[in-house]
């Protein structure tokens, strides 16, 4: 993905007071699809009006910046969903106490993916680390750099 595209989109989102969570580019070369995920900083749910405002701001920036997207494109703006990705230290801090599914080489013996409870997230000498507890009660101290993928876990009650 064009890193300039991500920077421009992120600035547009954050300029409106929202959290930029992710951007994915898909679709075809002739008509790319930009899937932008945003969140509210106040902890409330993202509403349709939020997505509309952010979409208009992103469109204005993209249409005024030649070379970022050539020709027609489809822009989709939405919330990160219940299974929100966890990428940055602030993400981990925000969701202490919640459960997450973590993929790391550290958990290769059990298939690489483990559901854990997030216990803490901190910086130690510029090394971002998280402490999690697995279903056996074992605590793991992980460097953020060794986490390949992480998402909030969702459990539906019936």
Image: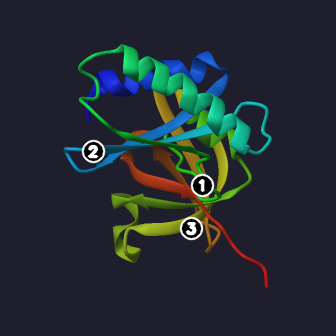
Give the residue pinned by disc 3. 115
Q: In 3D space, how far apart are the residues under numbered discs 2 and 3 (Cα atoms)?
A: 37 Å
Determine the image quadrant of residue 77. top right
133 to the left or right of 142: right
Which residue ends up furthest to the front in the rendered image? 72
In this rendering, would 88 be left or right of 92? left
User: Which marked residue is nearer to the observer: mark 2 or mark 1?
Assistant: 2
SS category of the residue bearing label 1? strand
Q: Percent position (x, y) of residue 53?
A: 64, 29
- Does residue 126 appear in this view? no
Residue visible at 42% across and 39% down in the picture? 23
Image quadrant in which the N terminus is located: top left
- Residue identified by numbered label 1: 132
CB within 8 Å, label 3 to label 1: no
Q: Nearer the viewer, residue 54 or 131?
A: 54
Mark 2: which secondary structure? loop
Neighbour tally class for label 1: few under 14, some 14-19, many 20 plus, Cα within 10 Å: many
Residue drawn at x 29%, y 44% as measured from the top left: 32
SS at circle 3: strand
Classify 94 as above or below 10: below
Q: Which mark is residue 78?
A: none
Q: Which mark is first along the chain, 1 or 2? A: 2
Report the residue marked by disc 2. 31
- What is the spatial separation of the Cα atoms under label 3 and label 1, in whole angstroms? 9 Å
């Amino acid at each position: 993905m064009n890193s300039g595209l991500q920077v421009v989109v992120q600035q547009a989102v954050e300029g409106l007071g929202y959290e930029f969570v992710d951007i994915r580019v898909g679709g075809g070369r002739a008509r790319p699809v930009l899937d932008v995920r945003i969140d509210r900083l106040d902890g409330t749910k993202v509403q349709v009006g939020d997505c509309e405002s952010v979409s208009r701001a992103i469109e204005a920036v993209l249409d005024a910046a030649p070379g970022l997207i050539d020709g027609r494109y489809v822009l989709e703006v939405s919330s990160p969903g219940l299974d929100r990705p966890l990428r940055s230290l602030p993400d981990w801090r925000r969701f202490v106490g919640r459960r997450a599914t973590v993929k790391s080489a550290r958990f290769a013996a059990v298939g690489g993916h483990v559901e854990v409870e997030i216990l803490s997230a901190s910086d130690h000498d510029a090394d971002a680390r998280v402490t999690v507890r697995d279903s056996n009660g074992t605590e793991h101290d992980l460097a953020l750099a060794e986490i390949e993928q992480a998402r909030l876990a969702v459990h539906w009650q019936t």
